Image (cartoon, rainbow, N blue to C red):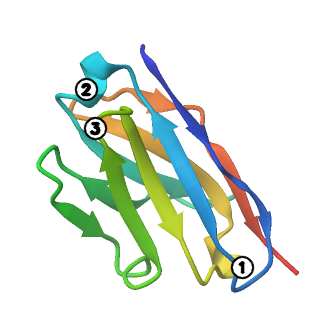
Amino acid sequence: QVQLVESGGGLVQPGGSLRLSCTAPRSIFSINSMYWYRQAPGKEREFVASIARDGMTRHAGFAKGRFTISRDNAENTVYLQMNSLKPEDTAVYYCEAVPSGSRGQGTQVTVSS
């Protein structure tokens, strides 16, 4: 299965910011909506945000006002700007191309003082 490549995770203090990136092959990126999910230890995977090919976005309730998804069609990259991070945002963040189902390996985000 085609792998997407995420980057940008790391350790950040509460209130801090991170920008995640996910790059896909053009053949995948150009025909799919792009989603961000996250999974914390012991918890189910949950939807974070999505962006369609036309730029229409959706954000989960917990993400509204703090996270912003965007895409750069020239670079085949989707971004997740995360501000005002909280300890409960700690998780592995994954991107996925929908409907193709291609996924990345994930990037760890840890919010801790």
Q: Residue furthest left?
A: 54
- Name which residue type carries label 2: Ser
C-alpha span from label 1 to label 3: 32 Å
Q: Secondary structure under badge 1?
A: helix
Q: Is residue 9 visible?
A: yes
Q: Position of residue 11 (x, y in %)?
A: 81, 63
Q: Residue furthest front?
A: 74
> Of callouts 2 and 3, which one flags the residue occurring earlier in the amino acid sequence?
3
Res. 100 mark = 2
Residue at the location (28% across, 29% down)? 29
- Name which residue type carries label 3: Asn
Could you tell me if the residues under marks 2 and 1 are in contact, i.e. CB atoms within 8 Å? no
C-alpha span from label 2 to label 1: 32 Å
Residue at the location (33% across, 48% down)? 71
Res. 87 mark = 1
- Taking 89 as reference, is 93 above or below it? above
- Taking 81 as reference, is 8 above or below it? above
Residue at the location (45% across, 52% down)? 79
Q: Badge 3, how many Cα within 10 Å: few under 14, some, many 20+? A: few
Quadrant (top left, top right, bottom left, bottom right) of the C terminus = bottom right
C-alpha span from label 2 to label 3: 17 Å
Q: Secondary structure under badge 3?
A: loop
Q: Which residue is mark 3?
A: 73
> Of callouts 1 and 3, which one flags the residue occurring earlier in the amino acid sequence?
3
Front of the two marks 1 and 3: 3
Q: Badge 2, how many Cα within 10 Å: few under 14, some, many 20+? A: some
Q: Badge 1, how many Cα within 10 Å: few under 14, some, many 20+? A: some
- Name which residue type carries label 1: Pro
Q: Position of residue 56 (x, y in %)?
A: 15, 59
Tell me: 1 left or right of 111. left
Q: Position of residue 65 (x, y in %)?
A: 40, 85
- Taking 15 as reference, is 29 above or below it? above
